[in-house]
């Protein structure tokens, strides 16, 4: 770094701007991280409200509350909002806050782009959610947007496509920023392989994002031209191929599911060592395992399509490739267990969520192996068994990872300890209700209930009733989470120390709590005790 | 709201008491392949349970044993090549044990050669059309009237009082018992999927494509399923009913369908192109 730049930065030691300008023109990674996290919390409740409507309707056979058309809008929007609005921005928010702190960088590498990539999101979701009020209602063809059905969407169609373009743009810019920060701005003596696992998991996730988001953008653009400009990419009548869309979509879609889970792997790899008071077991092989999962995620997409009619050899290939993912995923589970083995564990809220992640994500992994088995998957496909499977990996998987991360780093962000008792109550309510909600869905699917239906045959009543009760409990429990977070933000609670926990590893614990507005103006030396691997 | 809630509660009590429908598993089905699929499903499930016992057991053990409150000192180890090689190799072996029978079954599923009977299934928003090629028999199959009347909001009809609610049609597909029935699937509008759990088949019906699958039902009876691919507002209302009958009864069915006069059958085929059912 040249002296001129260093001097300019020395003059830059003012605090945040006042008022709305601080947020609108934010370039500080901590402010932008905060905005991402709050945005995703709002979206969690928006998507959650849609889930409540879905579960209310499904509580009993017969239609009680909504029409089938609106029901389909709810399932479609619930998925889009949760995936692109809640889970992904939450992880980007965590990356913004923590990656500079964890690698000893003063900020993200591209702060203005960082501002843009956040502010695109509220615009994108305003557009997406406004479609619910348009003639013909919001998109109702499922978040997978399969043609020809999606082309029957009303006025909402171009807005759907445009909002997805914007979300993709935001994700790509966020990913570029994360990669550049990690590659260029690490503390000088932090070798790549020695980086904390959260940083590693995000580095690989960011490459996945850059690889597949343009693919999604291409696919939805072809939908757009099919609808408005007379092309026939996916229309059989014009010589196009509706199945081709599914191949392109899932080439994006499968890496996308790892985009949503790999950062959670990273979080769990930070939390467990801290509360086991023992270094992460097999740090380097964890990195290789994530890389292997990321690679495999590109060659398994057609396992989402085992009923579309593929050649036998294709089905065999995708079955074997999919089963292979269980190997690196297993390595991760075993290594986390080995990390706890022989430790001296305590069970604060972040650890509880990490442990629940371990158990429940593994259940999602088991059903993942089951759905890889093609003959059985022909039965599971598009049934509630699949709904159970992906909710087990996304809710107690990705969402629990986020919750663990928030409880783990909240004292660092706000300078206040959250209320441990309330945190534990929140954990137990969440962990119990998540199972009451999603476990019965395995049974429903196996017994023959298709997904995406507003009404069902009467033999499915009992488990649906139970799932709905669980969902209401789960939804209400998250209000407690919002209350706990808001309390810390308002400066209530005990003041947190710089270390917060019992001698955790990592550079983020070497700065005070709350982390000052500007940190690591000088690249830190990484003390040997703080190196990983 | 309260009325609804009490309705829910009484409904649950009824459901739990009268029907005891807490079904939790896949049906074993009525064909060789459905049984094979079921066995495969159970085999993988038992492996998962076995692995869960070991892995969750280890996790629970360490959570109980290695707690700070028991005054233990944390160990320092962070690597073990032999351990990591072990838990890479063992899963690969288990996966191979699963993959081999799965591949064998899949190869049999894909072998649709030499069928005894062929039916062409066409998906419509929101009903199915069945045709027996060369037999001059073809008809639409739509949601049965009783379900159709009960399904609307405020219909005042309790679905519990409707027999086979949402799983009944006006005209089922009829096939002979013990015959290899090849099903050719396509669609007239959007993608649908033809799913009958007890016959263990599910295949997409895609516009512009002719998909192929087959089944051989060994037990006569009525088997019910639903469209499995989201196809629009009435996706939940286009069930599938397959009636498996003795071969003589099947022949009689074909003859009776043909009898009125051939022109009528093909006439209804082209004229009834509209979605038919009111969709309010």
Image (cartoon, rainbow, N blue to C red):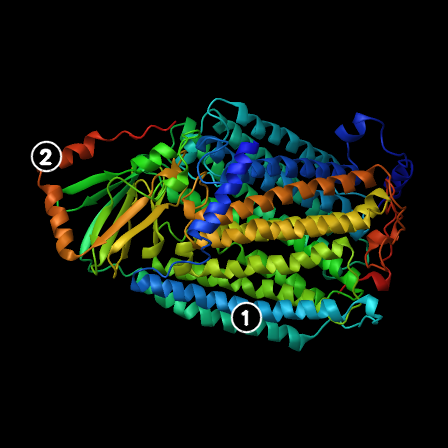
Residue B121 is drawn in which quadrant?
Answer: top left
Can residue A503 be seen in the rendering of this structure?
yes
Residue visible at 45% across and 26% down in the picture: A154
Q: Is residue B52 left or right of residue B188?
A: right
Residue annotated with mark 2: B263
Which residue extends farthest bottom? B82
Residue visible at 42% across and 57% down in the picture: A377
Residue annotated with mark 1: B50
Secondary structure state at the residue bearing disc 2:
helix
Q: Which one is in front, B34 or B131?
A: B34
**In 3D space, how far apart are the residues under numbered discs 2 and 1 (Cα atoms)?**
61 Å
Q: Is residue B14 left or right of residue A208?
A: left
- Decide: few, some or many residues near mark 2? Use Cα within 10 Å; few <14, some 14-19, many ≥20: few
Which chain hosts label 2? B
Residue visible at 55% across and 37% down in the picture: B5
Q: Is residue A525 above or below residue A39?
A: below
Residue B233 is drawn in which quadrant?
Answer: top left
Q: Which one is in front, A38 or A506?
A: A38
- Decide: few, some or many residues near mark 1? Use Cα within 10 Å; few <14, some 14-19, many ≥20: few
Can residue A168 be seen in the rendering of this structure?
no
Q: Is residue B195 above or below residue A338?
A: above
The quadrant of the rendering that contains the C terminus of chain A is bottom right
Q: Which mark is residue B130?
A: none
Q: Which one is in front, B173 or B9?
A: B9
Q: Is residue B62 left or right of residue B140?
A: right
């Amino acid at each position: 770094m040249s002296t001129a730049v260093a001097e300019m930065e020395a003059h830059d030691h003012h605090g945040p701007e006042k008022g709305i300008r601080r947020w609108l023109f934010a370039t500080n990674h901590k402010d932008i991280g905060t905005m991402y996290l709050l945005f995703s919390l709002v979206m969690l409740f928006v998507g959650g409200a849609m889930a409540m409507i879905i579960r209310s309707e499904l509580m009993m056979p017969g239609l009680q509350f909504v029409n089938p058309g609106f029901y389909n809008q709810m399932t479609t929007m619930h998925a889009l909002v949760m995936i692109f609005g809640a889970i992904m921005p939450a992880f980007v928010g965590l990356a913004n806050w923590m990656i500079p702190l964890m690698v000893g960088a003063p900020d993200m590498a591209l702060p203005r782009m960082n501002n843009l990539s956040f502010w695109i999101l509220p615009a994108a979701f305003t557009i997406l959610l406004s479609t619910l009020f348009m003639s013909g209602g919001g998109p109702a063809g499922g978040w997978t947007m399969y043609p020809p059905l999606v082309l029957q969407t009303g006025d909402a169609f171009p807005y759907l496509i445009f909002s997805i373009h914007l979300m993709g743009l935001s994700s790509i810019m966020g990913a570029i920023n994360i990669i550049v920060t990690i590659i260029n701005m690490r503390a000088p003596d932090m070798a790549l392989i020695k980086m904390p696992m959260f940083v590693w998991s995000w580095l690989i996730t960011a490459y996945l994002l850059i690889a597949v988001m343009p693919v999604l953008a291409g696919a939805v653009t072809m939908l757009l031209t099919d609808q408005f400009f007379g092309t026939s990419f996916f229309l059989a009548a014009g010589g196009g191929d509706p199945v081709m869309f599914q191949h392109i979509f899932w080439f994006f879609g499968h890496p996308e599911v790892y985009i949503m889970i790999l950062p959670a792997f990273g979080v769990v790899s930070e939390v467990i060592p801290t509360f086991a008071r023992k270094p992460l077991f097999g740090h380097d092989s964890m990195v290789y395992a994530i890389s292997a999962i990321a690679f495999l995620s590109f060659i398994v997409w057609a396992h989402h399509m085992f009923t579309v009619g593929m050649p036998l050899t294709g089905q065999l290939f995708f079955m074997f490739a999919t089963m292979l993912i269980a190997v690196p995923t297993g390595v991760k589970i075993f290594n986390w267990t080995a990390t706890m083995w022989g430790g001296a564990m305590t069970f604060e809220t972040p650890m509880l969520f990490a442990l629940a992640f371990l158990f429940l994500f593994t259940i999602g992994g088991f059903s993942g192996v089951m759905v890889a088995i093609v003959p059985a998957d022909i039965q599971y496909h598009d049934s509630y068994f699949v709904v159970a499977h992906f909710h087990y990996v996304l809710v107690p998987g990705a969402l629990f990872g986020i919750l663990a991360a928030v409880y783990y780093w909240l004292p660092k962000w706000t300078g206040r300890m959250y209320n441990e008792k309330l945190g534990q109550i929140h954990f137990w309510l969440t962990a119990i209700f998540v199972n009451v909600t999603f476990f019965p869905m395995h049974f429903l699917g196996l017994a023959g209930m298709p997904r995406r239906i507003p009404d069902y045959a009467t033999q499915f009543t009992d488990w649906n009733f139970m799932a709905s009760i669980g969902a209401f409990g789960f939804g209400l429990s998250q209000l407690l989470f919002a209350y706990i977070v808001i309390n810390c933000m308002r400066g209530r609670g005990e003041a947190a120390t710089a270390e917060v926990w019992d001698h955790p590893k990592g550079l983020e614990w070497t700065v005070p709590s709350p982390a000052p507005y500007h940190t690591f103006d000088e690249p830190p030396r990484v003390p040997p005790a703080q190196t990983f691997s | 709201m309260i009325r609804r809630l009490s309705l829910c509660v009484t409904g649950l009590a009824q459901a739990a008491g009268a029907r005891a429908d807490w079904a939790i598993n896949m049906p074993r089905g009525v064909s060789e392949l459905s049984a094979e699929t079921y066995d495969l499903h159970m085999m993988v499930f038992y492996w998962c349970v076995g692995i869960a016992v070991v892995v969750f057991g280890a996790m629970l053990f360490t959570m109980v044993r290695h707690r700070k409150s028991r005054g233990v000192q944390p160990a320092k180890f962070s690597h073990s090549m032999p351990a990591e090689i072990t838990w890479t190799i063992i899963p690969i072996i288990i996966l191979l044990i699963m993959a081999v029978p799965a591949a064998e079954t899949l190869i049999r599923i894909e072998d649709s050669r030499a069928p005894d009977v062929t039916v062409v299934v066409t998906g419509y928003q929101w009903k199915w059309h069945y045709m027996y090629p060369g037999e001059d028999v073809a008809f639409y199959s739509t949601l049965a009237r009783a379900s159709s009347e009960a399904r609307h909001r405020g219909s005042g009809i309790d679905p519990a009082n409707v027999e086979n609610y949402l799983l009944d049609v006006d005209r089922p597909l009829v096939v002979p018992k013990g015959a290899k029935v090849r099903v050719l699937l396509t669609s007239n509008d959007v993608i649908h999927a033809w799913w009958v759990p007890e016959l263990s088949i599910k295949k997409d019906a895609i516009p512009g494509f002719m998909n192929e699958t087959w089944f051989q039902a060994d037990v006569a009876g009525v088997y019910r399923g639903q469209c499995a691919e989201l196809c629009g507002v009435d996706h939940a209302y286009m069930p599938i009913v397959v009636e498996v009958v003795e071969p003589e009864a099947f022949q009689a069915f074909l003859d009776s369908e043909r009898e009125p006069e051939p022109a009528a059958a093909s006439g209804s085929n082209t004229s009834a192109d509209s979605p038919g059912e009111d969709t309010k």
